[in-house]
Amino acid sequence: MAGGGVGDAYGEDRATEEQLVTPWAFSVASGYTLLRDPRHNKGLAFSEAERDAHYLRGLLPPTIVSQELQEKKLMHNLRQYTVPLQRYIAMMDLQERNERLFYKLLIDNVEELLPVVYTPVVGEACQKYGSIYRRPQGLYISLKDKGKILEVLKNWPERSIQVIVVTDGERILGLGDLGCQGMGIPVGKLSLYTALGGVRPSACLPITIDVGTNNEALLNDEFYIGLKQRRATGEEYHELLQEFMTAVKQNYGEKVLIQFEDFANHNAFDLLSKYSKSHLVFNDDIQGTASVVLAGLIAALKVVGGTLADHTYLFLGAGEAGTGIAELIALEMSKQTDIPIEDCRKKVWLVDSKGLIVESRKESLQHFKQPWAHEHEPMKTLLEAVQAIKPTVLIGTSGVGRTFTKEVVEAMASFNERPVIFSLSNPTTHSECTAEEAYTWTQGRAVFASGSPFDPVEYEGKTYVPGQSNNAYVFPGFGLGVVISGAIRVHDDMLLAASRALAEQVSEENFARGLIFPPFTNIRKISAHIAAKVAAKAYDLGLASRLPRPDDLVKYAESCMYTPAYRSYR
């Protein structure tokens, strides 16, 4: 029994690699049906014996090729495309045709293909989802399904679901309301849960909740695939979400991880606080981003020196990401120093669209911004705030490009030997500054990370490799840790454990190249370590239900990870 004690019917995990598998659909898949089944199809890699046993003679050309050769051919074909969206479509077609080969490609070429199946290309894919839509890749639940959501969930063919990623499409990346076309995000996220974290594809379920859209362009688009009406809000919205959350628990049990993705700020915080006590829920925009950024800061301290409490933090952007990161920094600071979290928050300052968040503005602030309103005179601009507060760490989560201007970055460099600058907004066009700007304006002294990838920068004969603070470092391993421990709730200490585990994976060699995050090439090893630390924390907190506790959690995590190698069929 692998995969956290759940029977591995499809032979997906490492622990079952050598076992023979029966390619079941509703009956044993064979002939033409087998070639049309993405879970079992191997293309030209079916052996002679398999072609005889499963009635494939004549349905395939006579040659037999290895999975490695298939991978080589497909990578060659992908590299011929000059338009990134064409690569995305080709990868989605492969996923619909041959699931194992899709994940083999993604795992073996992660640094090259991650930007294709996820940010930044997935943003363009969502914008054009109606035009490129071919086959449904998840569940669509709309206002039309009110009162019938449990029946809709039962239409999904898989019963053993471990991770659900759900969006309502209101705040897709930095692109705004894309309505039903936000489905590209749950699909992309779950392919990373599998490729990077080893969660089985059969245990993943992408869901889009369609409550309408306020995007006029989509409402007038003849190819739009969602409900053509304004967004439902208030009671109507929350009743639908309540029915959805209840139905998920009823259909899949207590231990299914529900990840909220790309909800608008007001709903994201409400949903997380409302359901975190009754369901196993996680918000990647608030908690995942925070965990990765905290890991980057812990690693950066090895370069700049001092502890978390020795530094002063200034954020541009006070939405889900900004306040989520700020809260986790304060929590870790509090754990390290035994100082109450309220006092630790005073080291962290936030600037929103109206200027520095200060005490005199408290009455007019949204509830999630209020803890960050400190005593200070009002400041209208980021530059004024930087000059007055003199932060050692500047973090951008504003979603607005080019807001870390030359004056702002030079001010940071004027009073910091090694200014820490994180411009985290996605996609690349929304980044607060580029890697080249950060290194040039600080004479190569900046410790820099961004949300979307930037190429290495040459400055005065030295090459600087910018780090990418990508949520994909944490959420796949975090999800695996939750699954293998059978955790029933997510606790903040599990997020802190994930941050520390990621920071531990940064080597001296990485630091020497200016990196504060490890390279993505080792991501499955990193994910196994994160999963082990998260699972250990779940056991320590009494939140794990998978008993007895495995002796070696790293080994156990690795044995439960999905592997894309073809299985031999009886």
Image: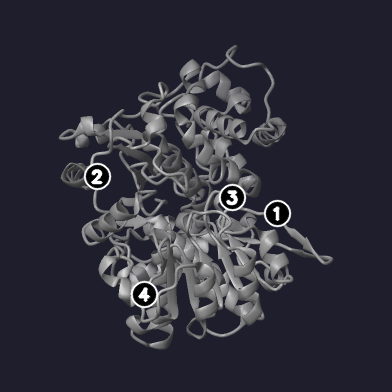
| SS category of the residue bearing label 1 | loop
| CA separation in Å, label 3 and label 4 | 30 Å
The residue at 30%/29% (across/down) is 227
The label shown at residue 455 is: 1
Nearer mark to the viewer, of 2 and 1 = 1
Q: What residue is pinned by disc 4?
A: 358
Above or below, comparing residue 376 to residue 189 in the picture:
below
Task: Name the residue located 58 percent from the left edge and 73 percent from the top edge.
Answer: 299
Name the N-terminal-most of marks 4 and 1. 4
Regarding residue 89, the answer to whether it shows in the image is: yes
3 vs 4, front mark:
4
What residue sits right under mark 2 in the picture? 248
Residue at (61, 56) in percent of width and height? 520
How far across and how far down the image is residue 81, in percent? 68, 31
Q: Are marks 3 and 2 in contact (CB under 8 Å)?
A: no
Which one is in front in this view, the residue at disc 4 or the one at disc 2? 4
Residue type, mark 2 in image? Val
The quadrant holding residue 154 is top left
The relative height of residue 276 versus residue 233 in the rendered view (above or below) is below
Q: Residues within 10 Å of mark 3 (few under 14, many from 20)?
A: many
Classify 189 as above or below 149.
below
- For mark 4, give the secondary structure: loop
